[in-house]
Image (cartoon, rainbow, N blue to C red):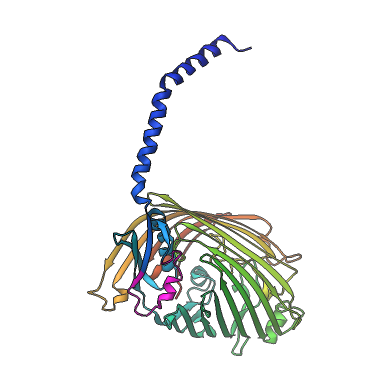
Amino acid sequence: MRSKCTGHYLSGCLSKVKKYSFLLIFSLYWFSSFSQEVGSDSSRIVQIRDVHIVGNKKTKEKIITRELSVEVGKRYPLTLLTDTLVFDRNRIYNTNLFNEVEITVQELGDGTVDLLITVDERWYVYPFPKFKLSDKNFNVWWKTYDHDFNRVNYGIKVTHFNFRGRNEKINFSFQSGFEQRFLFNYRMPYIDKKQQHGLKPEFILTTNNELPYGTVDHRRNLTSIKSDDQLRKIVGGSLLHTFRKNFYDYHFLSLGMVSTHIADTIAIMNPNYFGNGRTRQKFFSLGYGYQNDQRDNVNYPLAGFNFFISLNKTGLGIVDDVDYWTIKGTGTKYWDLENGFYLGNSISGYVSSGNQPFFNLGGLGFDKRLEVRGYDQDLIEGKAYFLTKNSLRKLIWKHKGNIKKVIPVKQFQTFPIALYGKLFADGGYVKSFDGYLNNDRLTDKFIYGLGVGLDLVTIYDLVFRFECSTNRGRKNEFSMFLQADL
């Protein structure tokens, strides 16, 4: 039974609704009419008459227009066209061919518009002296080896971006010092008229006179030996086929071969280096990958998302030295929280079959992007892992200067710089191989790292990262490194 109090309350509410219903309906109608009137001009239908490109002295126009989702001759609501061109501009910029990209809509007054794409091309040929540490990172080199310059690799690297004006990339690398290496690859993003299929052949030759033969407590440097003779030689080659079905979806198919020879000394010290005390290993591999990439900036994203997954089979039955498969994937999401705040989250996973020889092991720490910050010096080997990386960034300072009085080369005269502060929290779990007891301090348990850092983003999207972290074992680390595609 309904109480009197409740009945009086409901009656009062109904009388108020009746009293103000006319005013409420009139207000909604007025607001709706006002919104339609305000949006009537911006939602006009316009037709694209032509596309003009300015500033591309070397880059072929088709490389730029490939990234446009709008077409000449078609009609679009003006608001939709403007919003769409934001994404088109990001895709053109993410070719990494330009310092700046701007797309403007030029109204012609008869219901038609022209699109003006203005680009500022980068410098494309880089002969770089090469100076690289042989160790996992700066901390290992500085602390463990007392910054020994005998453990430095040096040489020259020549990179030609935008070869033939078609966004092709050629790499030559000659390296001596701690590790001797020759590398050549040639990336052709498009080999067909529809600009969907691409190829990337690669060849690599590496030799070592000092080599770690095992891992102790997640550190390979503790088992390193040195010789006047060659301890390891790697010869490898691969061919990667890419298929870009649309703007954001990429498919990859790779075929590779690697032949490796080690000295008897290494096989004696670690019979499982190749397994069964062998001194040679040769295998063919076949891999497939898929990527959906919708980041606003592939080098330093602040919004959008990226998803990648790959399946690789090592050992195709042609040579029976190894036989296993791996599956790995990463999903990353970035949020623009406004007012200079940005949030990022990534989740990665990896699983492999069987027990691989030491030379073929995977896990966390083999790739700088796939490690728990706070464990920079560790290689956590295992047959499967889970990793999550999270960061909250805040834009502290941003400036774009012109230094043409200092540098005469036009491509380097505009000098942008941005500084971001960040908090980060990473977590991971590595499943150890059965019976693998050399490294069990960090496997089969949840590990985490927390910290603060600074990211300095500057010309050509070079990113200098400075990070202070602590981990589950309350060990503090400071790391700094340069993230660059050069």
State yes or no: residue 198 in magenta: no
Specify the quadrant that holds the N terminus.
Answer: top right
Count of numbered circles on the image? 0
Q: Position of residue 23 (x, y in %)?
A: 39, 25
Most extreme residue toward the left is 405
Q: Would residue 454 be seen by someone viewing this image from the given angle?
A: no
Is 393 rendered above or below residue 382?
above
State yes or no: residue 68 in magenta: yes
Q: Position of residue 451 (x, y in %)?
A: 49, 55
Which is nearer the eye, 162 or 61? 61
- Using residue 286 as the reference point, say whether residue 65 is left or right of it: left
Q: Position of residue 319 (x, y in %)?
A: 74, 83
- Residue appearing at x 51%, y 78% in the figure: 193
Which is nearer the eye, 438 or 380? 380
- Residue appearing at x 50%, y 68% in the figure: 139
Most extreme residue toward the front is 110
Q: Would residue 186 be seen by someone viewing this image from the given angle?
A: yes
Specify the quadrant that holds the C terminus.
Answer: bottom left
Which is nearer the eye, 379 or 287? 287
- Using residue 219 as the reference point, say whether residue 133 is left or right of it: left
Which is nearer the eye, 58 or 173? 58
Q: Which residues are magenta?
A: 51-72
- Residue appearing at x 35%, y 55% in the figure: 396
Q: Position of residue 394 (x, y in %)?
A: 40, 53
Task: Please identify the quarter of the rendering in which residue 301 is found.
Answer: bottom left
- Using residue 320 as the reference point, say whether residue 462 is left or right of it: left
Most extreme residue toward the bottom is 229
Is 164 rendered above or below residue 336?
below
Task: Please identify the quarter of the rendering in which residue 317 is found.
Answer: bottom right
